[in-house]
Image: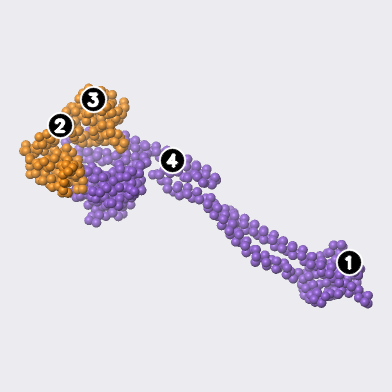
Chain colours: A orange, B purple
Amino acid sequence: MRLLLIEDEARIVELLTAALSRAGFVVDAVTTSADGRAALALVPYDAAILDLGLPDGDGLAVLAATRSSGNQVPILILTARDAVEDRVSGLDRGADDYLVKPFAVSELIARIKALLRRPGGALGTVLQAGNVAFDTIGRDVKVGEARVVLPRRESATLEQLMRRLGRVVPKTVLAEKLYGIDEELESNAIPVHVHHLRRKLLEAGATVEIHTVRGVGYLLEETRP
Amino acid sequence: MRLFRPRSLQLQLALSLATLYVTATAILVGVLVYQAYSTADALSKEDLNRRARHLANVAVVDGSGEPRVELPEWLASLYSSGTFLFDVRRADGPVIVASNAEVRDLVLRLPVPGDEPAYFRLKHFGSGERDYFGLTARVDSRIGPLRVTIARAADDDVLVRSLLREFVFNVAWLIPLVVAATLAIGILVIRRGLGPLRQASARAATIDPGSISVRLPEENLPSEVQPLVAAVNHALDRLEKGFAVQRQFTANAAHELRTPLAILTAAIEHLGGTDEAVAMLKKDVARMNRLVDQLLRVARLDAVALDVSDTVDLSTVARDVVAYMAPLAVANGRSLAAQGVEVPVLVKGNRHAVEDALRNLVENAITYAPPRSEAVVSVDPTGTVSVVDRGPGVPADDRQHVFDRFWRARDSRGQGSGLGLAIVSEIMKVHHGSVEVSDNPGGGAVFTLAFQRSA
């Protein structure tokens, strides 16, 4: 996995490069928006990390230029500005995610991995959480080495939860993904699917846990040792 | 010695006016009384003149060649009652008739009149000891030139008395009334004139560091006060600029702290390991991050006028905030739930600010709730949203302080910046809503945000 880091603060570059390398990424770092634009145009990166406050111009300009050239590389924005307008304008111009400084490096790595896991992203087809692997093509679920067979809707539930590992998946989103427009949705259908799924994961010895966020949805987290 | 000078302009004017009116009225009444007396005086002089001429006219020479004064019966009795004194004599001396001997002697003492009658006053005259006003004059008659003297008792000023009585009863009682009415009108006019000033005062009373953009109204002010109000407004302009600089500084300082903090955060993570010291460092830097973040929020709330005119669905906000905060709650071994979020509850406000406020409350609830307990965000159709936890609650004594900036309970666990609830309170103020803390009947605290329903 090759990442481009566009950031002018030397210490941050140093620390991020070290952390990302340890996480298995190859990192190219540039410190100006001109270099960033040039690098993005030349190298097919798997993802880019873009700081908005650059010495030779606004990072948003790099974002706009990259998108207008048709380059759809996933871009995560780093910003010390957290004014709402900044977030919105960043996402409007085609950023895929943003983090506000100061951030935890582990969070940055998780977000990058999530971007790569997206359909069309470099990590592509296999979702991973704890010892659970979900092959989105074969729709195969493995806990450790053992295959777990899940009915269609339970497997779809697991996919949604794994795609948003560590974040809440609203019940409404699950309902949309699990049922067609014409299909009747019983009020306790989703809790029942989650209940079965939870039991099966537990029985298989999965190191993930489905938490209920009453009134809102569900949250998949890796079980803490 | 200093005169008493009231501080109130209104009172000063009223007092001056009252003094003016009372003085003017006193002078007016004095003049009227004087006029009445002098008119009465003129009248009584004329009366005496008429009587003198009459006496001369009725002087005749009878058959025996003796001069006599023939008075009608009724006049004779009046003239002898003591109210009048009279004496008629020939100009060359011999007395024709007189009230009594005292008068006869008196006339001899009076100056001899020329062409004009001579008037005189008598004090305690005669047996009656009465005061008299009279005249002595030369009057021509059929029996030759006469000297007629007639006087009338001065205490018999019936005319003047009745005149004054009439004046007092018919006119004088009106005077205090007119004075009172004039004063009342004067005070009303002053009050009305000072009305805009009172409005300006009321407006000035609302100015505090959060509403420094308020200016005093300069319309309809009395021109004497207008420069003062304008000067105050200019002073406020300068203060506002100063404030803005100050706030911008806070915002900038907080902002500038972020990059070094980001470096510090990353560096500590880079240390890795499960060292207890590293864990402590991580905790410390996390707290610092939070403080800087909250400072920046406060600075922004202070500096930027929040647009709260949008319609916000509390249910959506509650769901989003719960979804956003749930991973943190789970990481801390607590759970989070939303209640009453199935139907939209629309209120007036700013979506991001409402989220901020609610997120702060949820953060607190997660921090203070005991492990494995559930904090609940509950939306009510009346336009309120509450955060209920099972923590220790807020002691009644602390309730008025918890919303102050940098206030923290004595036994607080030290994670908070002391700004979270101040931010909440400020956001609610801008929304013309309220934040209240109460007891959860089952133990714990309930923080309730109340908004204005959207029409």
Q: Quadrant of residue B11?
A: bottom right
Disc 1: which residue: B140
Residue behind mark 2:
A124
Q: Chain of mark 4?
A: B
Work out how far the residue at label 2 is from the one at label 3, CA to CA, in angstroms. Answer: 21 Å
The subunit letter for the residue under badge 1 reads B
Q: Is residue B43 in sight in this rendering?
A: yes
- Is label 4 in a helix, a strand or a loop? helix
Please indicate whether residue B168 sits to the left or right of residue B143 in the image: left
Judge left or right: residue B237 versus residue B17. left
Measured Cα–Cα span from mark 4 to mark 3: 49 Å
* Residue position for label 4: B239
Q: Disc 1 or 4, which lies upstream in sequence?
A: 1
- Amino acid, disc 1: Asp
Residue B431 in the image: state x and y as whole percent.
Answer: 34, 46
- Chain under numbered label 3: A
Give the alpha-carbon distance from disc 2 to disc 4, as whole Å. Answer: 59 Å
Amino acid type at mark 2: Gly
Q: Nearer the viewer, mark 2 or mark 3?
A: 2
Q: Is B218 on the left or on the right of B54, as rendered? A: left
**Residue type for callout 4:** Leu
Residue B217 x %, y %:
47, 45
